[in-house]
Image: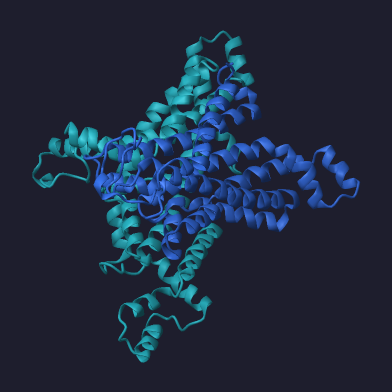
Amino acid sequence: MTGRKFWFIWGGLFLAILVASALFGPFLSADPAKPDLYARLLAPSFAHPCGTDELGRDVLARLFSGGRISLAVAVSVVLLAGGLGIILGAVSGYWGGRLDSFLMRTVDVMNCVPTYFLILSLVVIIGPSLFNVVLVLGLTSWTGMARLVRAELLSLREREFVLAARAAGLPARRIIARHILPNLGTTILVASALLAGDAILIESGLSFLGLGVQPPVASWGNLLTSGHEYLQLAWWLIFFPGVAIFLAVASFNFLAEGLRDILDPRMRAGS
Amino acid sequence: MLPLLLGISLLSFAIIHLSPGGFLETQVQMSQKISPASIERLRTLYGLDQPIHVRYWRWLKRLAVLDLGNSFTDGRPVRDAIAAALPATLLLQGISLIIVLLISIPLGGLQALRHGSTFDRSVLAGTLLTYSTPTFWLGPVLMLVLGVNLGLLPVSGFQSPNYAELSFLGRFLDRASHLALPAGVMVIRDLAFFTRYMRGSLLEVIRQEYITVARAKGLDERTVLFRHAMRNALLPFITILGMSLPGLLGGGFIIETIFAWPGMGRLAYTAATGFDYPVIMGILLMSSFLTILGNLLADVMYAVVDPRIRYGGTR
């Protein structure tokens, strides 16, 4: 099996399972918010494949609804940060000049600030919630994408096909959107996959510490928080959410690896 | 350098003033009986009646002498709180960084030399998997297994209660055993990045013509690798270390919180959950300044190590 296929198959398989379970799981499982005080802290069984939590809620059902949140966070952060990064990077790289140096200084400033501390202070000031976490993650993680896109633009804008398009009198917006950005497809996809993995990791970390999605809404991160309290009594409370986060993040990283192979065949691992 | 400092101070100032209502309103809400006259007096006292640029200038002047204000929760100067937390973070980060480099440089190097082999691919898969493991999951699990069930290592904290009474060797062992779990988790997380970097860097270098020349001269493979290839492959690490500083200072915040490690990350967490604005702003600023300093140091180091990029001067 060639390298590219290997990463694609495993990454894609994990991701497909996760997406399918987030979409259809809630219809097949118990009510994630319904407590049953006679069924507290039950070990995994046929009725409750991942056990029950301290209020007798079905862990599998809570995992499914948490999966929806994690995937929603990943998608929205990619759209927000990726969109911002692509637009600012393209503008910066295509026109250059003062705007470019202003934007790149901004990127430099953002890169000197420890992201976690920035996220922490913003989340505290505007308050912990799902929407705010997405907002803060989106506004703090666009710099990498902007740098990538700008660097590519700098070299592409001097190429003949761009000059030809410019000579033909096309407006700059159309040149960037139709002629330049399609050449960056793989680069953008790799960066987006990495962004998605990191977004899930950071969101669940914040939720774990009580700074993200707030209970009673279930997210993989805050499932771990309650699991932490019953660490010695109920291993399944911490085991399954951990595996879920791990699989989601790994699938995005594997996909990025497969895409990266296409981008730079010289760095390919395994053939 | 100076524009960066200014940019960071502007960013932090903007964040403080983003806070809805500001901290005066928060304090007013806490004591309902406060009279409008005293609110006005407080406003003047804190200088909040001044226009924004005057406030920024005043704040900047205090910043220049490292006056970051006092903590809301325990009243001690923010500067002291950070100074007390910094050594623990540096110790944890420094140790784990050294371990990471000791593992990832040989590992990534070997990957590049056996590029395309099963070894290469399994290391890549392995590091991708460790990178994907959430630290806030691995931490508690290791705590339970190694700390509680097997009783091999202390579960959390910086040192044992009887630390002061221990001999020198005892203190060393005590600190090392407390470091083991948080540093271990951190190493597992950071391994992927540095290994990948080393692999790419060496792979790039061994394809250069001067390596072919060195081989063509008849030098043995060891000399080619260590004298010619490794030296050049390791150069970018100086920059990479400088660039990863913000991640190193802030990235341990979840690990420090889980293991009750009294560093910057845990300080930031307690400040955040206690709405202690001065402390969290101070941490944001100080860690950014330290990062700029680190980047500057990396640039200087690079010029020292690599004669090709010395600015100006003799050629």
Residue B89 at least partly seen: no
User: Viewer-proximal residue, A69 or B219?
Assistant: A69
- The picture places residue B74, in percent across and down from the top left corner, at 25, 67
Q: Residue at x 13, y 37 (%)?
A: B170
Q: Is residue A179 left or right of residue B119?
A: right
Q: Is residue B78 left or right of residue A149?
A: left
Residue A101 placement: quadrant: bottom right
* B293 over A164 or under it: above or below: below
- Residue lying at the far left in this picture: please name it: B165
Q: Residue at x 53, y 21 (%)?
A: B229
User: Viewer-proximal residue, B309 or B133?
Assistant: B133
Q: Is residue B285 left or right of residue B308?
A: left
* A222 over B213 or under it: above or below: below
Specify the colour of chain B. Answer: cyan
Residue A72 at least partly seen: yes
Q: Is residue A229 left or right of residue A124?
A: left
User: Viewer-proximal residue, B206 or A81?
Assistant: A81
Color encoding of the figure? by chain
Residue A152 placement: quadrant: top right
- The picture places residue B112, in percent across and down from the top left corner, at 52, 20
- The picture places residue B33, in percent across and down from the top left corner, at 30, 86
Placement of the C terminus of chain B among the 4 image quadrants:
top right
Number of numbered discs overlaid on the protein picture: 0
- Residue lying at the far right in this picture: please name it: A168
Q: Which chain is blue?
A: A
- The picture places residue A250, in percent across and down from the top left corner, at 48, 33
Q: Residue at x 34, y 40 (%)?
A: B137
- Residue lying at the far top in this picture: please name it: B218
